[in-house]
Each structure stands twice: as structure tokens, then as C-alpha cells.
Amino acid sequence: MTAVEICVDDVGGTAAARRGGADRVELCAALSEGGTTPSLGMVLSAAEEAGRLGLQVLVRPRAGDFVCSLAELAVMRADIAATRAALGDDPRLGFTLGALTPSGDLDHEALAGLVAACGPCPVTFHKAFDTALAAGGEPGSLLDRLVGLGVSAVLTSGGDGPAVDHLETLAGLVRASGDRIAVVVAGGVRPGNVARVLSGTGAREVHLRAPGTLATSSAVVGTQYDAGSRTVTSAQVVADVVTAVRDHEARR
């Protein structure tokens, strides 16, 4: 069956993803900036809400590029260690991370240290992969190197922009991945196009945000910090995606 991963940055978002029928969540902060490392409190809250769901914790110390300084790598390893210490041997736990050189290539030394810090927890290489592709990286070679580093999945749109614009590239990645590494298709995946993404790529895992809007509870709105509503994870959007995926599977 196709796995559906929902990225969440809101307290209660993991519970909403579970109600909607997701298989896994990626825990983040600041999705408006592409996602950064969530707080430990957020991770612990999500662990209580998750039930059977897998818990991928994003490890990204800041927005912007994926070139990490030594100080940033130290913070990333410390965040991984703190999360593992807090959740113990929780089999649901995994990490999503990435690091590139200034030229856009995989930063092998940095990645080796990060993967080692994750111990037995599965590691997903995030959409820094698309930056590596844009820098001229050969897709099959990039996958081979990630496998060699012990990475178990790669999160990708197949290029810059939405996944539906790169179905051929994604299909090639899925073929090249074999059973060695999972290709998790991300980028503009929605209930209305997920069947096209799956049929066009052969992928068995998809990743998306499932946004809904919640009105503010404050009587004082229209200020710098409160526009009157905020984005939360919608159980209905999750359910719509899961239904579209299961309908696609039934037609295969």
C-alpha cells in the first residue's frame, strides 16, 4: 500500500493526521519557511497524539540554503541526541535531514556524522536532494551515495517546483531506487493530483502538507502578529488524500 506522510508544525496536527488516516508525520516548525527543527515539547506532544503513526523529526536549524556550518552541524547532532533521549527506543521515531557543499553536492562528511547520530532510527534525506539535482547531480549516483551513507529514503519533487512537473524524472528515480531506498514524492501533492503522481512515477510514498484555516480566538485581530486566522493541519484534507490514494490502488 502507498504510504501517506503529512508534514505538521501545529500542536494537534499529528492527531489530525491520525484521524485522517495518514501513515506517518514529519514534525516541523516554521513550515512557512520550508520547515525547521521542532521543539522537544512539540515532539513529545506529537508522540502522545500519534498512535501507530511513524514520527519523522525534521532536523534543520534554520531556513535558507542547506550548507551547514560546523556550529550548525553540532546543533543538529545535539537535537538528534536530545530527541532520541526523550523518546528512548520508540520504534516510530525517524529523522529527516540533509547537508550540501557550497557547490550543491552531498556533504558526505557532514551526512556521515548526522546519520551516525541517528543510530538505528531511519533517516530520510530531505529536499536538499532537489538542490543537488539542480546543481547537476546525476540522480542514480546521488541515490547510490545516499544508500552508502545508510539513508533509507529521499524526499523529492524530482526538480524545482511541483512534483507533477517532473513525473519522468521521478519515475526514473523510483526505477533506480529498487528496494534499496524509498522515493517519497513531495511538492504540490494534493487530493486532486495524487493519483496522477502515483501513476506517473510508480512511487509508493507521498508527502504533503494538509492545510486548513482556523479563526483566531483573540478579540484583538489585524495586528502584526494576528491576521484573524492561522493555518493548521486539516483532518479532512488528510482524509481526502488518503481516499484518493486508496481509490487509485483499487483501480490498479
Image (tube, rainbow, N blue to C red):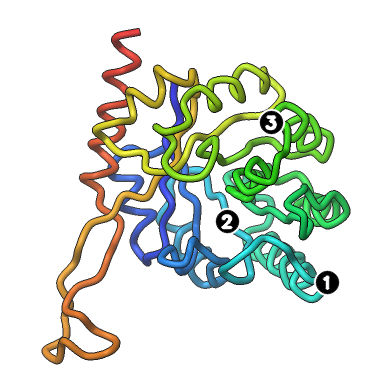
Left or right of residue 217, residue 147 in this image: right
SS of the residue under disc 1: helix
Camera-near label (1 vs 3) is 3
Residue 122 is at least partly visible in this image: yes
Q: Mark 1 sits on what residue?
A: 70
Mark 3 nearby-residue class (10 Å; few <14, some 14–19, many ≥20):
some
SS of the residue under disc 3: helix
- Toward the viewer: 13 or 244? 244
In this rendering, the answer to whether 60 lies above or below 205 is below
- Disc nearer the start of the sequence (2/3): 2
The amino acid pointed to by label 2 is Val
- Toward the viewer: 99 or 138? 138
Please state the horizontal and vertical placement of residue 215, each as a whole percent of the image: 15, 72
Q: Residue at x 76, y 44 (%)?
A: 120
Q: Residue at x 34, y 62 (%)?
A: 12
Please state the horizontal and vertical placement of residue 29, each as a whole percent of the image: 48, 67
Screen quadrant of the N terminus: top left
The amino acid pointed to by label 3 is Pro
Q: Mark 2 sits on what residue?
A: 57
